[in-house]
Structure formats: structure tokens, C-alpha cells
Image (cartoon, rainbow, N blue to C red):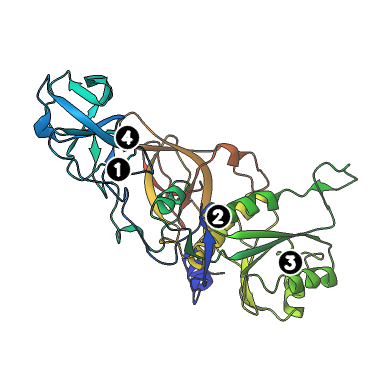
Amino acid sequence: MISVDEAIAIILDGAQTLDAETVSLSDISGRILAADVLARISQPPFAASAMDGYAVRFCDMAPGAQLTVVGEAPAGAPFVGTIASGEAVRIFTGGAVPPGADHVIMQEDVTRESERITINAPQEKPRNIRPAGIDFHEGDILAKIATRLHDYHGSIFAAANIPAVSVTRRPRVAIFSNGDELVEPGATLGPGEIVNSNHYALSALAKSWGGAPDYLGCAADSEDAIEDVFSRARDADIIIPIGGASVGDYDYVKSAFHRAGGEAWFEKIAVRPGKPTWFGRLGNARIVGLPGNPASALVTAALFVQPLVRRLAGTQSDAPHFSTAVLTQELAANGARETYLRAGAERGDDGVMLVTPTPNQDSSLLTPFASANVLVRRRVNAPAVASGGEVEIVRLR
């Protein structure tokens, strides 16, 4: 068996960010930038009015003064000409401020009669004009390479007159289950059958990490059936078989993998849960074989699949990152395998991160993941830790 750190290093060895593709702004949320995004224009591209009112010269703003309205500047239809002393242009929010004007007086501060306005309120200083480029200027970097784009980036790029951006191709993550005992949700269960559930969380996780999950179904317990799925998945960047990774009489995944032409790089990890996790290559695809027990599959996915998806997707950070938290209960000494406990973590009133492992850590249980947001890392032969002691944690979500 190899250690957790050794397994991660082998899985990531030689893994490179995938090639780039261009996508429209409607499809960028969650994608990873393959190049810096530079503004094509300034925003706003001209000095714009922040109010409905009149564009004027501030030197004309004596209370009681009268100005002649020489035109209008609604949004999208600028006034043509320059404002001279004693003149005003009716302007609306978003309208381009005419040359010569350095102030917009609100319409509530004037009285208009025909084509003349009278200043009714003192004006303290020039205001109500948004300068050109107040948001960003042409050539500004709006987002750097490797940025994970969120929901607001589309509007930012659109305002900069950018219709599409270059992003890293999402790694295709082919997932399949294995086991004659598995049936799909909603089916009537026969003797010895259980519901096939792990792939739903794994697909959602792969997507959240930047991948494009592709569930290929459930392969029967035969080498032919499993080899067929491996053949269909060869074009994927990552292949995740779930189950069949142990040494039972009906565990055919690894033998079928070898029949398909795959090469295994390791077959066990000194980790609990998830000891049967294995890794190999099939053509250009990297295979991370996960155990069938739910906790084993989901914990090892977080530890070993997540960094690989993130590396291929081009994220700024791919390896699991550990921090410390304070235990709210005691933990017994650990044994010869690095152990990961599902736990809930939250900040106390003093800002300290407090962590509480879920009561039952059985590897068959799914419900602890509903409340668990971190894993507590227990290193090999770690001593017991009293309540109030510090432990390492890594985020699940």
C-alpha cells in the first residue's frame, strides 16, 4: 500500500491543464479562464449623467439665475454641440454629458418655463456626472487566467463589449457503477438488491470541481460487460469505476481493465475509508477506481479525484488544502492507516473553527454527508486528542 500523499502525487504526475475553447457569455459560469480578459472599451465610454435634470456649467449656478435650454440629451442620443455660459441641456439618467458641462442639476432644483430654467436651490459643488471609465478603462484586466468565473462575470464582460471568452475545456469524467445487486431509484427491490446511489453525488461533485460528468450506467458483474464500458469511456479524460475494486469472487473491474489494455499504477492506499482505491491509465484516460461503499467512494473522491479534475480544468489550486480546527469532543488514537472522519465545522463566537465528527463513521452510511462539511484528518498512529485539542481538516463543500 502507498500513503495518501504518495497516491495524490502519482495521480497528478504529468497531468496538464487541458486545451482552451471559446464560449459565449451565457455559458461561462463555473468555467476556468484560459487567458486574461481585457476590456475592449471603457465603462462608461463617456461621461454620463447620474440624474434626470439639466447639464450646465457650474459657474452659472447662482440661485435665481436663468439659463436657456438649447437641447436634449436622452440616453443613446447625445446633444450635438458645446454648452456655453448661460445655457443648459435637458438630460436624462445615462445620457452623455455634452462638452462644456461640468454639472447636472437635478430637475427638482429648477423651475422651467418654456425654454428657460430658473435655479431654485444652491449647488454646493459640481456633481451628478459619472466620469468615463469610472468602472473600468479600455485595456484593464477584468479577470486573470485561471480565474473560476461566477454569475456576475458575464455582465462585466458584456459591458466591456466582449461577447465570448477563452476557457479551459472541462475534463470529461466518465463514471460507471458495477454490481448485479444494483437497481435504479424507483424500482421494486428483489431479494438482495440495493439502490444504485453513489454516482449521483459523484457526478455533482465532479461538476462542482470543474469537470463534465458523464454517467455511463451500471455494468453487470462480468468481465465482458465491464470491458465494454471501459471501451466506451476511452475518450474521457478521467474514468471512475465505482465498486468491484476489492478481491472478492465477483470483483471483475480490475481484470476487465487489464483486458481492455489498461495499466495499473497502484492498487491500494493506506487510508480509511477507501483502502481499495486504485489508479491506472487506459490510453490517455486516467482511471481512479473507487470502492463501492458510499463513504469510501465519496471520501476518496474528495481526496483523489478532486485534485485531478482541478488540475486538468486549470484551476489555481488543485491539491487538498488542510487547516486546523478545535475539537468539541475527544478522539481516540489512530491506527496504521491515515483516517478521514466526516465532521461538521463552524466558527464559534470568538472566531475559532470548531469541529464535531459525526457519531457513526461506518463506511456504508450516506446520511452523515448531509451535515458534514469537512473531513478530519487523522495521521498514521496519531495519538488521542482531548476535547479542545487541535486537528487537521479539509473541506468537503
As drawn, the residue found furthest toward the front would be 114
Which residue was labeled with disc 2?
27
Q: For the residues marked 3 and 2, what is the alpha-carbon distance in whole angstroms?
A: 44 Å
Foreground label between 1 and 3:
1
In contact (CB < 8 Å): disc 3 and disc 2: no
The residue sitting at 53% across, 47% down in the picture is: 341
Residue indicated by mark 4: 351
Q: Earlier in the sequence, mark 4 or mark 1?
A: 1
- The numbered mark, 4 or 2, whose residue comes first in the sequence reads 2
Residue at (62% x, 65% y) in the render? 172
Depth order, front residue of 274/142: 142
Residue on which the image places disc 3: 247
Using the numbered discs, state the Cα–Cα distance from disc 4 to disc 1 in whole angstroms.
Answer: 56 Å
Q: Please, what secondary structure does the residue beneath circle 4 have?
A: loop
Q: Amino acid at mark 2?
A: Asp
What percent of the width, then of the height, locates residue 288? 62, 66
Q: Is residue 29 left or right of residue 36?
A: right
Q: Nearer the viewer, mark 3 or mark 4?
A: 4
Query: Separation of disc 2 and disc 1 at Cα?
Result: 38 Å
Q: Residue at x 62, y 78 (%)?
A: 284
Disc on the earlier residue, 2 or 1 = 2
In this picture, residue 65 sits left or right of residue 375: left
> In the picture, which quadrant includes the N terminus?
bottom right
Q: Quadrant of residue 276?
A: bottom right
Q: Which label's residue is closer to the chain start, 3 or 2?
A: 2
- Check disc 1 and report the residue beneath it: 79
| Gap in angstroms between the C-alphas marked 4 and 2 | 37 Å
Residue beneath the point at 51% across and 68% down: 312
